[in-house]
Amino acid sequence: MAENAEGDLNSNLLHAPCRTGDPQLDTAIGQWLRWDKNPKTKEQIENLLRNGMNKELRDRLCCRMTFGTAGLRSAMGAGFCYINDLTVIQSTQGMYRYLERCFSDFKQRGFVVGYDTRGQVTSSCSSQRLAKLTAAVLLAKDVPVYLFSRYVPTPFVPYAVQELKAVAGVMITASHNRKEDNGYKVYWETGAQITSPHDKEILKCIEECVEPWNGSWNDNLVDTSPLKKDPLQDICKRYLEDLKKICFYRELNSKTTLKFVHSSFHGVGHDYVQLAFQVFGFNPPIPVPEQKDPDPDFSTVKCPNPEEGESVLELSLRLAEKENARIVLATDPDADRLAVAELQENGQWKVFTGNELAALFGWWMFDCWKKNKSRNADVKNVYMLATTVSSKILKAIALKEGFHFEETLPGFKWIGSRIKDLLENGKEVLFAFEESIGFLCGTSVLDKDGVSAAAVVAEMASFLETRSTTLQEQLSNVYQLYGYHMSKTSYFLCYDPPTIKTIFERIRNFESPKEYPKFCGTFAILHVRDITTGYDSSQPNKKSVLPVSKSSQMITFTFQNGCVATLRTSGTEPKIKYYAEMCASPDQSDTALLEEELKKLIEALIENFLEPSKNGLIWRSV
């Protein structure tokens, strides 16, 4: 049901009474009312039908969610394009069909299911309920299911998939999205998020299995089936044991005078960050009481995304001032991302960007590797990774220190699967990140992990404290040594897909057909790489080394002045994002000059390529 309602109409529905005068819509309504057993979502569709809301019915029922960043993400509510009991059952049936095809030992190895704390009263959709239905579909088909008995951080699912040697796993979460949303995030047997062609193939299988099977609605199986196991204690224990691999100064941590405040942003993070601190030898971080416990309404924040900075960290910063704590750590609602703030000498708070934190993590993980490496360890065997829209600071560190740096497409699914390849070839990966505050220290999990990152930042800060240095001072040291990297990332909202397409097509045919721009205002462009079409002017054959990604728009410009800028669409939200970074060499130390140059370039990029007023783009509200 990719673009229209189910094609092969069941014969009994062909003769169904005409409800709306639109045969395609009538078919979809008939299917929904027959298949949905959730009284609240069924009633939503019945009410729309009763009130003649045909346009809304069509919007909800005549298209299906597609796989975005390694899974499905949408608002909760009734309809085939939303997340609800029925669409989760359909998705899991498709998963079953595909996995059965891929793994002859599927019924021996089983499947992992985890969930966060989201929920919506009006559709009686909660992550926990959707997780139970996911498990029920598989249990009804005699597949062993490892269903966590309570909410967990997202990284626990990929970790469990690897540890338990399951064929795949699903995490029910919408991470840091608005409260109305939920999602279905899929991991492959490698422990990395799924990439192409699995996403397309699973979608095909979902379309073949839209009618719920006998037993698919039977969520009692979760309580009665001997095939259901709860991996919580075992996985938690193994995960915490593995954390010790990235803890280097436990004794020093236990003596630190530093205090830390932690916000779990109304999500899953509190208990797990407390446990991680314990493993690292710290006193527990001070929790923000109003945000410590799960709350699906995210009642104290405008949006549950710690990446939005000081405006959403208000409660954490005020508590830290009261408690005399210099560092604030905030995990997003599913605890796979981490925001960090530090109190400065002048009494102001510095909220670090994802790129700045990566500079610190990169320095730290390499420094710890150097101090702890075995005698025969070879720096040429060491790797760090980042997505292509993230800072190039790791590249600068790698060039100077002699290890390898690699770029991947945006999205941790690409990082996870590349790390898997490197590990299988005997390489050592110390750190990987994406600029949207997603970090991975070590390789126990093949996805971003805010829980382990929080403990590592605390250890780094405690170590620096013994040298009378702050995180901000150390960031300056890193930039002085490896070159200043200043970046700015923001976005525009655009709810009209044709407008987005027009903006990017104009860039591809700038002054004449199939000609990319040579200048952006007064700034000369050295190279253009277009991931959507596979073009890269810097390569001898003009073909991009990174895989082509036709489903999203993404163009990168390398400028004569050392700046790199990317325009791309978001995989999960109606946004056009821009990423710009000034990559200076260590001898360029006039930061004011570099910042001014970057600011002017961004202005030129927005004015010349995005044309917000002409295209009706909505500026990000700060």
Image: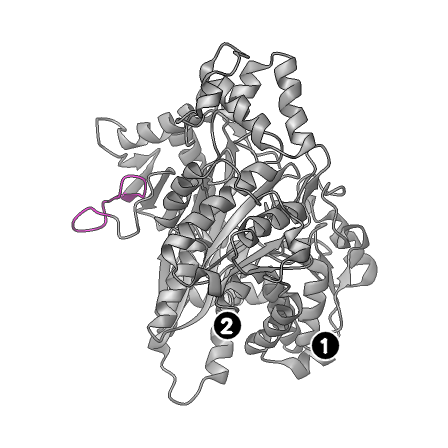
Q: Which residue is mark 1?
A: 256
Q: Which residues are magenta?
A: 526-543
Is residue 588 visible in the rendered structure shown here? no
Quick one: SS at disc 1? loop
Q: Position of residue 15 (x, y in %)?
A: 47, 16
Vertical position of residue 168 compared to residue 581: above or below: below
Quick one: SS at disc 2? helix
Q: Are marks 1 and 2 in contact (CB under 8 Å)?
A: no
Q: Residue at x 67, y 83 (%)?
A: 251
Determine if the magenta segment contains residue 534. Answer: yes
- The amino acid beneath tag 2 is Met
Q: Residue at x 46, y 81 (%)?
A: 370
* Residue closer to the observer: 506 or 348: 506
- The amino acid beneath tag 1 is Thr
Q: Position of residue 351 (x, y in %)?
A: 63, 53
What secondary structure prevails in the magenta region? Answer: loop
Q: Which residue is mark 2?
A: 365
Q: Quadrant of residue 149?
A: bottom right
Vertical position of residue 350 compared to residue 238: above or below: above
> How many dots with numbers?
2
User: For mark 1, does the 10 Å Cα neighbourhood hold few (<14), some (14 to 19), or many (20 or more) residues?
Assistant: some
Q: Position of residue 622 (x, y in %)?
A: 62, 37
Q: Quadrant of residue 301?
A: top right
* Residue closer to the observer: 101 or 406: 101
Which label number is shown at residue 590? none
> Residues under labels 1 and 2: Cα distance?
20 Å
| Residue sitting at the far left | 541
Is residue 334 visible in the rendered structure shown here? yes
Where does the N terminus fall, quadrant-wise? top left
Q: Residue at x 64, y 21 (%)?
A: 46
